[in-house]
Amino acid sequence: MRIDLTTETLLKRTTSRCPVCCQPAPAEVVRVTTGAQSKVFLKRTCAEHGPAAICIASDARFYWLAQGNPENACCGGSACCASDEGRPGTLGRNAAGRGDAPFETLSTCLALIEIVNSCNLKCPTCFADSPFGAAGSRIDAVPLAEIQSRIDAVIARKGPIEILQLSGGEPTLHPQFFELLAWAQDHPHIDYILLNTNGVRIAMDSDFSDRLGKTFRPRRLQLYLQFDGPQAAGQRELRGADLRTVRDRAITRCQQINLPVTLAMTVTQANLPHLWETIEYGLRFPNVRGVAFQPMFLSGRNGGAAGPPARLNTADIILAAVAKSSGKIRFEDFTPLPCGDPNCATIGYLLKTPGGIRSISDFVDFAAMQGFLHDKMNYSLADLSKCGCENQQLAELLHQFELSESDTFRLLIKPFMDAWTWDQDRIDRCCTHVIRPDGKLDSFCRYYSGFANA
């Protein structure tokens, strides 16, 4: 008779949040192994509400202790910001113990700015909890001059912005959207612009999409298009409506104007079985550059959910995608980005070759490219050529097949945090920042958590 013993291994100590009161609580990250299966759990104990735990990696192979860029931490190499109470990783303290946040000294790989507060949808899962504004109603937009001033101030303090993400609300509703887009594309210190959009106006307003096609500049702008998969399951739960036809129309319209698109998919239990279908859907379009998978978290309109959620994590995404791909992607095709905490973003690539869809790991050890991935989130075809220089395999492959930008397809897994999954170490290494209304930078997870100042 076989008896599987369960063992528990402490991986690290950190600071988390009580899911009841959202106050900081001492926490441990532990690997729990039963037989051949290992999972990772985050356990914390609140002085008032007691212990709480949640699985943060359903397969321990896809949880990584911080081994990225050691300089990208607010305490000179480790998440060790001491608070007045002596707990590590307390919000709002940097290495010198000052009360300001550490994000001014961390690397900013992506800077997000909300340019409009109104939205033309009312998605139940909106992380921003934007107020709904029907067509023809007054749009609550941030003045153009204020947006420009906040962006310029960040550049003056920290240097060029690699990726500027225009968000909201629905940013395409801004009455001076095209003036802002032209200004950002002409800015000498903004490398690339992501437009975070639900695609409704692009799909339904031909005048707007025509002007977008005339305004955007190649290699300067990409759509980050809200997309929930090609399947019927989960559509209404996520958006309050089935918007698949609208998304199809938006992607087709972008293809007509040669505008590249990344599909931004909020992943739930309902659409988890359809990740490979989403990848296959995106591969049909030459202008779709990849899919960003974002496990749903509790924030904005979705912030009031009670009870321990059936939370998805990076391992769930990888396992589900690989299982349905018929071998086209494998576990070794994914590697963590080292620019921040390695559990904040995981990346993989597929190549569209004359012989069919191939993964980069068919030709190179993608996980060994940590030096290439250092300090970046945006990769061009030239970057991918460079990353194969040491062994020449990838560079030769790209040259042999004369691959273009449309022949690379990126898979990005971006799990954001809330009180249940809060790991202060990740905040202390964060490189995805929000330019707040007061002009200061904040971690994306911290800003949208709703308890940044708790």
Image: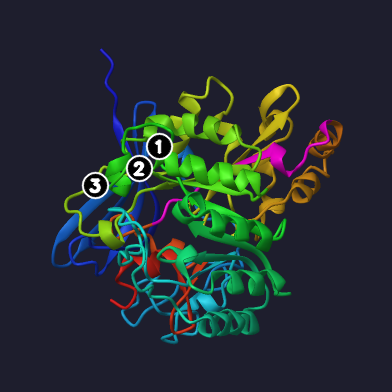
- For this orientation, the residue located farthest to the bottom is 98
Picture quadrant of residue 359: top right
Give neighbour class at mark 2: few <14, some 14-19, many 20+ (Cα, 10 Å): many
Q: Which element type, helix, strand or loop, lies under badge 1?
A: helix
The image quadrant where one finds the C terminus is: bottom left
Frontmost residue, 406 versus 376:
406
Q: Amino acid at mark 3?
A: Pro
Q: Residue lying at the far top in this picture: please name it.
A: 1
User: Compared to 423, does 187 lie above or below?
Assistant: below
Asked whether the residues under the numbered discs 1 and 2 touch, taking CB atoms below 8 Å apart as contact, a structural biologist would say yes
Which residue carries the number 3 mark? 309
Q: Tell me the kind of residue under disc 2.
A: Leu
The type of residue carrying mark 1 is Asp
Residue drawn at (70%, 46%) of the image = 369
Residue 316: give its label: 1
Question: Is residue 282 left or right of 364 when viewed as pictured?
Answer: left
Q: Could you tell me how far apart the alpha carbons at marks 1 and 2 are, in whole angstroms?
A: 6 Å
Q: Upstream in the sequence, badge 3 or badge 1?
A: 3
Depth check, front residue: 191 or 48: 191
Q: Which residue is mark 2?
A: 312
